[in-house]
Amino acid sequence: MSRLSELVESRERHIVTAEFPSIDGGGLDAVRSKLDPLLPYVDAINATDNPAAHAHASNVSIAIALATLGAEPILQVVCRDRNRIAQQADIMGAALFGVENICALTGDDVTAGDEPEARRVFDLDSPQLIRVASGLAEGRYLSGRPIADPPRLFIGAVENPSAPPLDYRVKRAALKSNEGARFLQLQICYYPDRLEKFITGCVAEGIDVPTALLPTVCLTKSARALTFMHDNVPGIDVPDDIRRRVASAANPAEESYQVTREIAQHALSLRGVAGLHITDFRHDGSLARLVGDLGLRP
Amino acid sequence: MRLLPIVEHAVKGRVWDCRMCGQCVLHSTGMTCPMTCPKTLRNGPCGGVREDGHCEVTPEMECVWTVAERRSRSVINPNAWEREFDHLRPPVDNRLRGTASWSNLFSGRDRQTPLGWDGATYSPDLTVESSLGEVDDIDSLDAGFHERNPLP
């Protein structure tokens, strides 16, 4: 059983997951140097799958590298770049190396990346992929071909609590939970009221019981970074007042940190939240500071 | 029968911007064609929907699923269809592209899914690999072997 699955089942404390930075070369040493500052502070780490539609060292290779280096990987599998055959092969291949945690997501469109002329695939969508991955763990490919020695998988997904249609997002979380998602990493949400409404909805539907809800918080350094996310990252809206607050602060980096800490504290105060997913764009020790300030103990 | 896809497209293309996937689910998606989503998502909106409810890929277009969700709740949409909005729709069968969903609906072909989708498996005896293991001379396989295997 993966450590993440044990924590989700026991809920003995808040769970911390984080996004692993993209790797473009430098061998395992490059992976190790990016991993070392993260490892003591997180329970599991996302091996991302060409984030924001930019090509990098593959999700499977990074997941295997993380496992090799003693971390607990979460293999992200997006639907944008590969068809159902390749997606199943990736999950099965990573499982050979002990990668059990899977995070199924639709993926940003190719037009969000630096190769917008690429063909988009989307052969499956994320709810379908969750069902297909559940099938692998139960001993069959989508075709129905049996798997004699099925992989042990712990499947999760992503949901955006802050994107329209807001009222429908809880139903979509329920759909993913019903198909086998045992954790949901929630997209970054700068609207505490929206997150609260989403979590309350999930609790009312009983989604938080089988499925750990992990809101994402994002560590940034400046108003420029927030504006960049607001303008360029699909599905993320950073309200004007937050951008103004950071821009007008005497120390924008510190103010930015405080914004993240407040959002994280609010998220953790909500009944039904099982932990946090952290995306760190600062790489200056802020992740360790945040985990410490919030009293999280991975 | 060759005329049917042409007639279907002439009607549905004009009204719903039908993309002729051959396995129409319009009734369960608020009469909004999911294949007009740039990501061709069959099960709801992605996380990239803009603050104004518009599409991540085509900002001038309202998200297909924002429209679908709203229309599915319309008073003129039958309750049974509204309930189906929340059901998981299976992956597209790409072999049906360009065929008439009307005839596929009539024959039931549009509701056929891969065995594993509903938890079934097929006998491992029927895989290409295991069959080839029993064949000494691969050239002796008759024409159409690969079309028939694996079954079904």
Image (spheres, coloured by chain):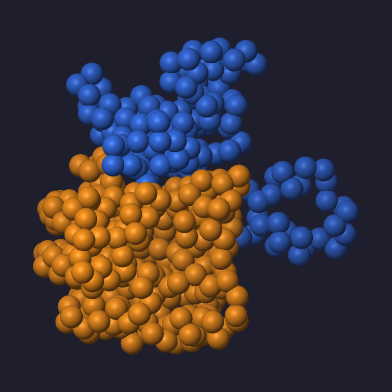
Residue A35 at x, y percent in the picture: 44, 82
Residue A231 at x, y percent in the picture: 37, 49
Q: Can residue A107 be seen in this view?
A: yes
Along the horizontal axis of the image, is A13 left or right of A16? left
Along the horizontal axis of the image, is A141 left or right of B147? left
Question: On screen, A276 above or below B85?
Answer: below
Quadrant where the image shows the C terminus of chain A? bottom left
- Give the quarter of the image for residue A187: bottom left
Residue A49 at x, y percent in the picture: 49, 62
Q: Is residue A84 visible?
A: no
Residue in the image at 60% along x and 81% along y: A27
Tint of chain B: blue
- Give the quarter of the image for residue B129: bottom right
Tint of chain A: orange
Quadrant where the image shows the N terminus of chain A? bottom left
Residue in the image at 20% along x and 76% along y: A14
